[in-house]
Image (tube, grey):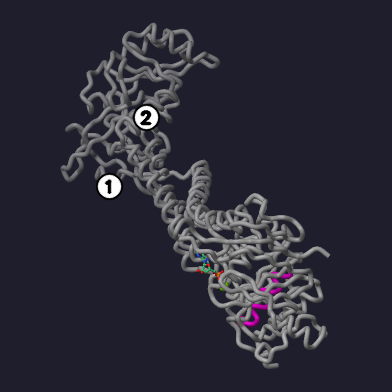
Amino acid sequence: MAAAITVRQVTKSYGGGTAAVQALGQVSLEVAAGEILVMMGPSGSGKTTLLSIMGVILRPSSGTVLVAGHDVTALPERELPGVRLRHIGFVFQGFNLFPALTAAENVAIALDLRGERRPAALTRAKDALASVGLGDKADALPANLSGGQKQRVAIARALVGDPTIILADEPTAALDSHSGKLVMDLITRLAREQQRAVVIVTHDNRTLGYADRIVHIEDGRLREDDARARGRAEAGPGPISGRPTREWDLVPFPA
Amino acid sequence: MLALRNLLHDRVRFIVTLVGIVFSVVLSAVQLGLFLGFTRATADVIEQSEADLWVVSRGVTHLESGVPFSESLRHLALGVEGVADAQAHIVSFGTWTRPDGAREGVMVVGVERDGAMGQPWNLVAGTARDLGRPDAVIIDELYKDKLGVTHLGQPVELRDRRARVVGFTRGIRTFTTAPAVFTSLANARTFTGLRTDQALYLLITAKPGADLARLSEALTHRLPDVEVRTTADWSATQRNYWMFGTGAGISVLIAAALGLLVGVVVVAQTIYAATVDHIREYGTLKAMGATNGYIYRVIIRQSAISGVIGYGFAMVIAAFVSRASQAGTTAILLPWTLAASLFVLTIAMCISASVVSINKVTRLDPAMVFKG
Ligand SMILES: Nc1ncnc2c1ncn2[C@@H]1O[C@H](COP(=O)(O)OP(=O)(O)O)[C@@H](O)[C@H]1O
Ligand SMILES: [Mg+2]
């Protein structure tokens, strides 16, 4: 099976001349369909930059990005929205819901973008909300939802368009631990059920337990989690491959 | 979906936008309605004359500046092939003395006794025939106060001669502040200081089927030192003179244009402020795969919805203003053609007001969605 996203020797610099900031240096990464990848790193290490490049929101300074096997770095600007529409679902730290729309309409707008008609789109949106456990909140405005509920609406919105890959930037950072756990459970369960690739950027250790694979990023360079390799060597392949095993990595959300 | 919801969500801003649009459209509608009202008022006496042709002394630029010629031209005109009727006619300024002694300028309209052309119309009291009585005048009821007239049969004074009000018309307005005073030709001559054999105009009715261009030519040829104008042509000359020749119309049109400009600015302001407020949502849409076109449609739809609703309110107000103006000496006309043109203008105004916002969104970097 082809990788959902392939990043090859990507660099990214912001600005030019002497003021240029090298945010990423020679990053290569592959995310397979159905794989849950957690990316960790300190603030300013380039996590968001890499996620934006994978999401075809930002162009790399050099290197190539393949989405579902297609090189998107060669595409003209006007074709990029279409690539995002077909392949990428985003989940943001700040939810980014449309405050004037109900939960169902927030989800339906992803279908509206795909040209789906209103009544059908709303029906599908309500189904999607039910699948994130918000079947009874279809008509609620975001202002009347809790943070965790908002993020679940955002997840429904990201998934309803049937994307190849879900990119989540700190999806639990604004949530309490209970909501965070719900959200992580949901993303990972739906991703596995629907065989979607998921990339989660975080510096929340509690999300590590959900990862198939963990990469660390520091100063714009990737480092595969050595704990994982060590863990595998010591314990052999577990029920979920790549599960981190070091004590301090295993700080689960309280149930 | 998003367009309408965002509008309703920012209710205060939506109301500000609507108030701006309503203000601007009402202002423009009133100014343009005034323009139309003035335009009609300048030439009503010509338009309603029921003449086919007007014989005018050569070089006369507008109705109020007629140059006298001998009434005998009328007989010459009657002899021209194709002329069914010819009447002498007078339109000229005169001075009216109110009962309290104050003087008012009036436009004396002298019409031929029992003639078929140039008669007062829309009579609400008396008949045109009453002008056959000595010293009889007919005025418009809109100008009763101005002329100090309270009742039918009231004695009045024109150029120090006595006259008597024998009838009232309704809605004959003049653009100059001088109200029309209909009277007989003989009275008109005394009131305006013309000699007893003089006239200022000839009104011509052509025989059925006669070619007006050919007839004009024949009359011009036959009568010395005159121009012969069709009623439509003479009316247009009169309107142009007052509306554009004097600049009176220009200032009204400028006010109308300013009204629309205010509208563009107000709408552009509020739409832009709304766009800036919602910039994160537009960034999210871009990240989700919306094309620029999709977002433009959201913004333009917001402006257009505001425009349609604002226009609706504005027209209701303008219709009331127009209705109310019917009772005064300055008519604000609101024909459906003006209403339709204003609709197009309003929508165009609202859409052009979106341009700044569209420009802002075009340059929006979707990467902003990740910023906390
Ligand atoms: N638009 C930008 N312009 C200039 N520098 C930027 C921009 N975005 C990010 N950077 C810089 O690039 C580096 C990586 O940023 P980012 O990818 O946001 O890191 P993270 O998400 O890991 O905190 C940082 O040094 C940051 O200051
Ligand atoms: Mg970041």
Q: Mark 1 near ligand 1 (CB under 8 Å)?
A: no
Q: A177 or B88, which lies in front? A: A177
Residue A30 at least partly seen: yes
Q: Is residue A153 magenta?
A: yes
Q: What residue sits 23% from the left and 36% below the top?
A: B105
Q: What residue sits 52% from the left and 61% below the top?
A: A14
Name the side, left or right, on which B338 lies relative to A168.
Answer: left
Residue B145 shows which numbered tag? 1
For mark 1, name the chain.
Answer: B
Residue type at the position of mark 2: Asn
Pinpoint residue B320: horizontal percent, then vertical percent.
Answer: 44, 54
Residue A123 at least partly seen: no
- In this picture, is B243 found above or below A135? above
Pinpoint residue B13: horizontal percent, then vertical percent.
Answer: 47, 65
Q: A95 or B328, which lies in front? A: A95
Residue underneath mark 2: B240
